[in-house]
Image (tube, rainbow, N blue to C red):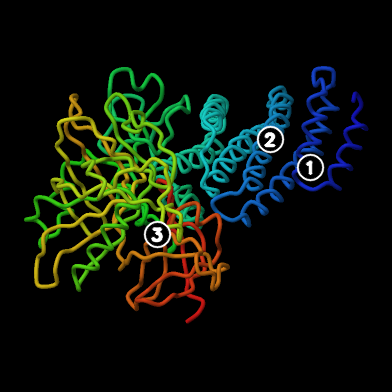
Amino acid sequence: MTQSTDLHGLLDQLLMREPLDAVRLLGEEFVNINWQDRDESEISVIVADFLPFLTRLAGRIRTDLRQSPLPLSDKGRLRIDALLRVYRYAQLMLNLKLNSLTERVDNDFGSEYLVRAHQERVDWTIRIIMDCYLSYVDVPKSLYVDLHQLVDLARGELQEAHPVGWQSIYQCYVAILTLAVINPYGLTREEMEDSCACLIQVGSAIKLVHDEPTPTSRFIDLTGKIMPHLALRTRTNLTEAGFFLDLGGLYQPEMTAGLSPVCRSQLYHLLDHLKFFFVGRGDRETKSTLPEQSKQHTSLITLGFLSVHHRLERLSQNESHQESTIALAGLDWEGLDQPIRGKVASISGVADFKMDIQTGNSKGQVDWDADVGTGQISNRHHQPMNEPGTWDVVNFSASGFRFHWRLSSNSHAAVDDLLLAEWPEQDKTGSAMAIGIVRWVRHMDAEHKTIDMGVQRFSGTVFASYARDYRAGETRWSKSWPVIVQLDEHAVPIRIILSTALAVEAQELLVMQEEAEIRLRLGSVCQTGQDFLMMEACRVDA
């Protein structure tokens, strides 16, 4: 294909194709084009025609992706792959556009288009990163590398000559980095989009630090190997591979001035979320400890979805009064030289436990996949249930808690694990509990003998039960799955914690509650964890 008219014919063909097919055809044709053989005027025409088409094509794929169920199916992942390909083609067009503009910046018209081209390149990258967040899939490290490089190029060409245009790009840049630091995988889709829009408005208060970090700084790795939501402690030569994002300016009272009520509320929520990532803040313990809980020194901790489910069952059988809260977090760890997760061997199967507090004997082993009705237990390898262990309590607060565990050997504690905390009773109501997902974990000493763990807390009453696919109907031997149901203040189910496999198989569940089955419809994903999801749920048979 050597003539621009051929590309116009290609564009006509693409307009008639389905989005995924159009991406495939576009890739087959673009790979054969020698852009160096085309003159500047011809390239300008091609860019003017194809760039708007790529924007519309990405919009169509994005719409289909938002309608895909979570977690993403194979078809949904194909859409993500298609978006990444469209992104590469768009960056190619923008590079060609930028190369033609650099020679014509001697007038206001050319300068305006130069700023816009840089803005478009950064916007495309941010939009694709957001697509990954909204789909709850990992962001390819090359996207983060692209983002940092494109912003660096924009800084070099615009910071002095076009400060207003550069400031707009900068605020979008630090907004997506701050959202990444907060851990978007611990937010709903709506919270991600609203948070990013609000952070753009206050982006001028966020600073980049290239030397000693402040107490409210987080490390950003320029190589893309360490995701922004992974926290690192300061160590030698750390800043050679990145910089620190100083978020302290967001805590200034004047930051809320001029913001809409919605954005102001969202910012307060983000700041509350952020404080759990600043582990080193000296006044956290005294400010966050509740008076009635200040005397607590230890807590009984159970880790792992199935272990927590089993423990909740035992507690509900033994006690008539329960005060339960749910804690939400996400994908974060803190380490010294290596992340704790890096030392955890991969475990396959439903019983995916990251910590064996006590290995126990055969009585503590539960086979969730036993063949129902056969009278025999499957021969697969059993993972021992995690029995409760005693942890030191650093602090409790209305929004979260923090523990220390002193042990003689390295721990397999990891983020994303469901956690059940029990502390001694305060009054006649019995012991209090909190269910959470580990937000960050770190070793506190070089010998790895003390574990520091943080969890964010979310109020709500919960109970452990079993569920089966609603489509099973009256089938006697339909498979049952362990679930944990969250209730609101009116005892109405609002969320459910369940295995990822069950979420893929079913849209509606029959859940046992007080010796009767209730029918729940699954909604959007609220949290992702180690082989489990927390999803919105509503009762449809009431």
The residue at which mark 2 appears reads as 85
Q: What residue lies at 27% left-to-right and 34% top-to-bottom?
A: 214
Q: In this rendering, would 115 be left or right of 369?
A: right
In the displayed structure, does residue 155 sit left or right of residue 228?
right
Residue labelled with disc 3? 482
Question: Where does the N terminus fall, quadrant-wise?
Answer: top right
Q: Residue furthest front?
A: 375
Task: Say which of 221 and 446 sits in front.
Answer: 446
Instruction: Compare residues 73 and 215 and report the one nearer the observer.
Output: 73
The secondary structure type at the circle numbered 3 is: strand
Disc 1 crowd, CA 10 A, few/some/many (<14, 14-19, 20+): few
The quadrant holding residue 357 is top left
| As drawn, 274 above or below 106 | below
Q: Furthest residue to the bottom?
A: 542
Q: Residue 329 at what x, y percent from top left?
A: 35, 50
Give, as a three-letter code, the residue at label 1.
Asp
Q: Earlier in the sequence, mark 3 or mark 2?
A: 2
Name of the residue lying farthest toward the left: 295
Q: Which residue is mark 1?
A: 21
Q: If you read the primary sequence from the N terminus, does the residue marked by circle 1 or circle 3 appear first?
A: 1
Residue drawn at x 37%, y 62% is 484
